[in-house]
Image (spheres, helix red, strand yellow):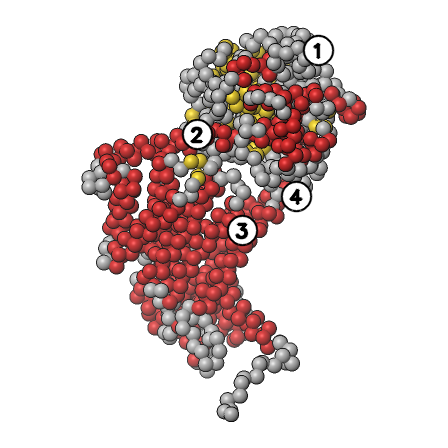
Amino acid sequence: MSGRLRLPLASWAATLLAACALLPLVKPASWIVQAAFLLAVQSGVGALARRVPLARPLTVAVQALVALALLTLVFAREHAFAGLVPGPGAFRFFAELLEQGGTDVGRYAIPAPLSEGIRLMLIGGVLVIGLLVDTLAVTFRSAAPAGLPLLALYSVAAGLSDGGNDWLWFLLAAAGYLMLLLAEGRERLSQWGRVFGGAARGPATESTGALAPVRTGRRIGLLAVGIALVAPLALPTMNGGLLDPAGSGVGSGSGGGGTISAVNPLVSLRDSLNVDEDRQVMSVRTELADVSDLYLRIVSLDDFDGTTWKPSKRSITTVPDGAFPTPAGLGPDIERAEIATTVSTADWYGQDWLPMPYPPSGVDIRGDWRYEPVGMTLVGDHGQNTRGLTYSVRSLDVQPTAEQLADSSAPPAALERDYTELPDSLPAVVSRTARQVTEGATNAYDRAVKLQEYFASTGGFQYDTEVDVGSDSQAVARFLRDKEGFCVHFSFAMASMARSLDIPARVAVGFAPGTPQADGSVSVGLRDAHAWPELYFEGVGWTRFEPTPTRGSAPSYTVPDTSDSALPDPAQPSEAASSEPSAAPSASEGCTVEQRRLDRDCGSEAPLAALPTDGDGPKWYLVPAWALAGLAVLVLPLAPMLWRLWTRAVRLGAHGRSEAGAAAHVLAVWDELTDTAWDFGISPDESLTPRKAAARIVRLGRLDPEAAASAHRVADAVEQVLYAPRPRPAVGPGDDVRRVTAGLRSAVGRGTRLRALFAPRSTVRVVWTASARWAGVRERALALRPTWRKPPREPSRQQG
């Protein structure tokens, strides 16, 4: 392949491979074909412009104009002159499409449908990244910095995807970047001639190019990718939990944008809730008449992979100033009342999500908070948490009737698709049990009520916080078989079974109703932490159900008007929320470990996103392991600079007093002089004598007379060592090199000085050294082969 085409093609391929990380975000993935074609046209225009040749800024400008024309042709040709030249109408249309795309991104779960707005964002983003990569790697001949836009493209995709195949997309992006580096390195090395070509392969074969460095570069690249893939598996993970007092913050970005991290909000609940003393988390005052319905919701879990439920990664925005939007699916004929609630959190309770009654209609809170519209939740940004806060929430007390729920129409297709999805690994017994339990039900509401009744009363389930049923795909099946568990088991099982019946479902996490106090407030403690399922009914919206026995209260709309219902009377509060005011502490506050073991109802809630497993406590090696990982992250980018500083110190340092030691020191000083010149852009030419090489450095480096004299003195010392029978001792060659270095630094710009410091070109000698050592090891290994393994005998050349 022609050298002129190798690097542009590598740039195109690297961008396209990194763009593959976006494939899981939308369906269908047909946009990648269109993006690849437009990217190829953009890269081809750049190759033609460089061959004309045009100035570098003009080349970039031509590529940008062509990319704009291509986007206009594909998306806005009806609003452009001749379908190709964009005008004011085309730019307005682009703005509308981008706004629509941003709305769609926030509205749909992953994978989102491929709307025109999302398609413009994807293809336009790939073209912009491709232009940056082509500009850096091809136009300005600097492939290493081109990894930054590729990293940005991959990071955006990895930050939004569900993480299932992140290793594959990383491997593709890394392969594209290595391909780009190798293409640039091969082109550079091929221009240096045979001196850098490496050893010949055999006695009759000459080196024909930069084969050894390229081969070694491939090996080092593959080794680096392998380490990057395997090393994270050996490092411990650090998770922030629902009651994690650290409150690291899950919002990202500034202003109104960003995304919610997929950190599981339940992962630390078990240890936090199984405490001897039930500490008060918050004090609540509310206008709600029946506090047994006062559930404080934190976040919803809507992504189910067969073993755990977790929150989807969604876009966040600024908190609305006035009233929040009407909840999804809530119709105008549903009775509702707006209530005000004031919450004061404990000074030690610092977590990222804000507990609120659902659905909220407005929040008055200080601090840096962001709003997630799909779940109607608030999340802290830049370390903001709930520690020691007092805030007011206006929320809707939605009061649908059983008839309204039973008469609900089918949900929207997109919502039904996202919230009824189940993994293939879910055991068949889950859906089979759901069909058996709901046999005879005529609508989704009846099926949901039968599921709740099955878990709460008729199914023979027992509430037990010490159940350990594992964390694999069989966890729900074992829970249905053993019929023992706590709220997370009940809510996860009911939500999974509802989805198997095509009822949209998710799991809400928060706090069950607390204990009313004599002063009119409600005390919410650690053991009030809870998880419950929410099912969607068109016209009503997301609706709470309560399948966990002895916890919370069953909503009135889930109790049909039949006298034989086995569900508890919703007017009667459960054991977890007594309606009688009391100045005494909660009954569970004084529970000892022994009491909790003997009395199950005294036990604490322990919801876990991944069902409980043993040995989840903190490990002793977390701190040193993460310290070493952080040190590696800091040191690796500085490795070239540190290597050059170390080699410079060794070469210019002290040396032996013998004649051999002095000669070796002079040769080391000469190596440092040539490598320093190389770092400042003067590539070495080993075909020249030391005297001519020094003259070349003086000329190209524009050295002043003092630095030039120092360079010539070092060259004279090298010639003495190499050719004189009795070399004269050199005086101060290290000081001469330092003067040459200062002269080279003063003659170049700031950018060249920074590159010489942080990305010195001479570090390629590490690759050559590794290649030479590998060749030596290989030759020694071949020489040690057993002599009895004779080579195959050549066929006889005799005729007849």
Q: Nearer the viewer, mark 4 or mark 2?
A: 2
Q: Residues within 10 Å of mark 3 (few under 14, many from 20)?
A: some
Q: Earlier in the sequence, mark 1 or mark 2?
A: 2
Q: Which residue is mark 3?
A: 228
In the displayed structure, does residue 270 sit left or right of residue 189? right
Label 4 – label 2 distance at C-alpha = 42 Å
The image position of residue 603, as x and y in percent, is 73, 23
Q: Residues within 10 Å of mark 1 (few under 14, many from 20)?
A: few
Does residue 603 lie above or below 577 as drawn?
below
Label 1 – label 3 distance at C-alpha = 57 Å
Where residue 73 sits, quadrant-wise, is: top left
Residue drawn at point x = 41 percent, y = 28 percent: 256
Q: Nearer the viewer, mark 4 or mark 1?
A: 1
Residue drawn at point x = 48 percent, y = 25 percent: 411
The image position of residue 534, as x and y in percent, is 56, 23
Q: Which residue is mark 4?
A: 621
Does residue 691 lie above or below 122 as drawn?
below
Q: Which residue is mark 2?
A: 107
Secondary structure beneath label 3: helix
Residue drawn at point x = 70 percent, y = 20 percent: 457
Q: Nearer the viewer, mark 4 or mark 3?
A: 3
Label 4 – label 3 distance at C-alpha = 21 Å
The image position of residue 96, as x and y in percent, is 31, 31
619 and 138: which is toward the camera = 138
Q: Earlier in the sequence, mark 4 or mark 3?
A: 3
Label 1 – label 2 distance at C-alpha = 46 Å
Secondary structure beneath label 2: helix
Answer yes or no: do the residues labelled 1 and 2 have beta carbons within 8 Å?
no
Residue 584, which numbered label?
Answer: 1
Label 4 – label 1 distance at C-alpha = 43 Å
The image position of residue 442, as x and y in percent, is 57, 21
Residue 315 seen from this side: no
